[in-house]
Image: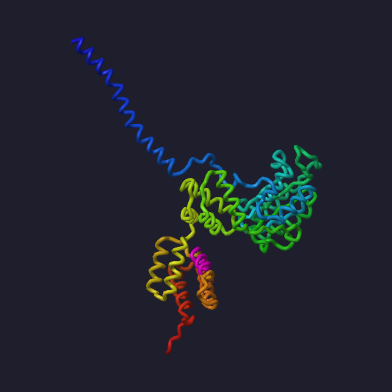
Amino acid sequence: MRANFGKIHKSGKNKSPNFTQKFSTTQSSPEKSEDEVKRKMAPVLQSSQPWVEKYRPKQVKDVAHQEEVVRVLTNTLETANCPHMLFYGPPGTGKTTTALAIAHQLFGPELYKSRVLELNASDDRGINVVRTKIKTFAAVAVGSGQRRGGYPCPPYKIIILDEADSMTEDAQNALRRTMETYSKVTRFFFICNYISRIIEPLASRCAKFRFKPLSEEVMSSRVLHICNEEGLNLDAEALSTLSSISHGDLRRAITYLQGAARLFGSSITSKDLISVSGVIPPEVVEGLFAVCRSGDFDLANKEVNNIIAEGYPASLLLSQLFDVVVETEDISDEQQARICKCLAKVDKCLVDGADEYLQLLDVASNVIRAVCNMPEEFQYDC
């Protein structure tokens, strides 16, 4: 019995490694397949930092497509004598980047925190903040200008007011006296999209710099540089699509590119960028316009219903439909003018809170009337 038991025990020992080996192979195979699927879906991104910050220019000379601004500010940095400045222009053109680069190049990393105060629209910037926080920071005197670590370190501080056009008129008026009183020890950098929203007394005290929208060539070169650094494949069609949906806003283009890279991997197509950006697909807008041109109101009603069911925003549809109408060459100028007038009225109604379905139906009916040369207002015989 003992001998037999020993044989059974030995045979059990011999079989157990094979069994565990088989069990381990059956368990590990699904894990490998999952890893392979993950690798095929998207590459592992080394850094979680937003690409907008990762590729933000660190020096004024690296700011893209603003040659005049860069030339003037480079000369200003050489003398280290900055006036009050007002940067204005469309979003994503380098206004904030330029202001931060000037501050970093003047003071370096050591003095930056003590010499520079940044306030954004998210901060409370009412009249009380101007009277307390800004005035207190502006009133503090600084030491005489001595170079530290290769940086000029001029004898004044900088207050950067980003999105200054969102400040109340009272707060802007309160800044007038502060700018005059502490001009020897403090410089103000105002950044805004609309210069018309800055009161004239403030604007007249600043050197104004206009930032232009980025051209497609400049944006494409910058995007291709990021693609090479991140190992992305972007064909010519996708590059053109990215430029068109960004409307000269490089920050928006880089954000769309990073979102598409996370979702679709290293090979990005035009469709991927459109889905990430939330732009209505061109075939949807062109389909609605084609149905309206046919003159069939029932088909136009169905198309409007489909657009509402898909959840596309009506305001965005109006903007894209406007581009389609303007670029269409086989309708007259008068027809284009009638359609654009209707789009303007409907846009105002949407802002006031009107129903999207009814407003889009109004657009469709007016486009049909304009294209088919019907009168603007129907006349009824009593």
Give the x, y percent position of residue 287. 43, 67
Q: Is residue 347 above or below residue 145?
A: below
The location of residue 56, given as percent across then percent down, is 62, 47
Q: Is residue 29 left or right of residue 84?
A: left
Q: Whole-percent x and y of residue 51?
A: 57, 46
At a point 69% along the width and 50% down the height, the residue shown is 99
Quarter holding residue 11 = top left
Q: Please identify the residue farthest to the front as the structure is shown.
A: 236
Please give left or right for residue 242 compared with residue 218 in the image. left
Picture quarter with the N terminus: top left
Which residue is located at x 39 percent, y 64 percent?
Answer: 306
Q: Position of residue 36 (x, y in %)?
A: 41, 39
Q: Tell which residue pokes out farthest to the right in this image.
A: 144
For the record, the magenta segment spans 316-324
Q: Residue furthest top?
A: 2
Which residue appears at 33% of the width and 30% of the height? Answer: 25
